[in-house]
Image: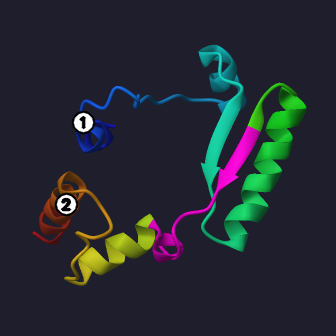
Amino acid sequence: MKLLREAVGDDPRVQVESFSGLLVHYAQEKGVSTILRGLRAVSDFEYEFQMANMNRKLDKKVETIFMMPKDTYTFLSSRIVKEIARLGGDVSSFVPPIVREALIARLVSASA
């Protein structure tokens, strides 16, 4: 949460919050009727499609909209970014500077 807040800075359009429980309940609590989800691959679609349908069953007023990333990010996952960093690769084009620094610090402390 701290890294997310630092990465988005003071942008008034962005709120960083966490919740536990069902996303549809969180949406209801916030008065939100639209959920925006990103899809990188077909495997993402299968999972997200099931979740969207379940959310619709739980509350028919909550809709899910899917967006696809630029083609340069379709392969990107946190697992891949961590692996690149662990093997000494440069991840600066994939994550904000604050996240890169935290990732490197974590890797250094894990190897000590």
Residue 33 occupies quadrant: top right
The magenta span reads 64-77
Percent across and percent down for residue 43 are: 71, 70
Relative to 111, say whether 20 is above or below. above
Residue visible at 66% across and 37% down? 35
Front residue of this view, candidates 38 and 107: 38
Number of labels in the image equals: 2
Residue 79 occupies quadrant: bottom left
Q: Are marks 1 and 2 in contact (CB under 8 Å)?
A: no
Residue visible at 52% across and 28% down? 19
Percent across and percent down for residue 83 are: 34, 77
* Residue 92: in magenta span: no
| Residue 22 visible in the picture | no
Residue beneath disc 2: 106
Residue 96 occupies quadrant: bottom left
Residue visible at 25% across and 77% down? 86
- Residue 1 got which mark? none
Q: Is residue 47 left or right of residue 96?
A: right
Residue beneath disc 1: 9
* Residue 67: in magenta span: yes
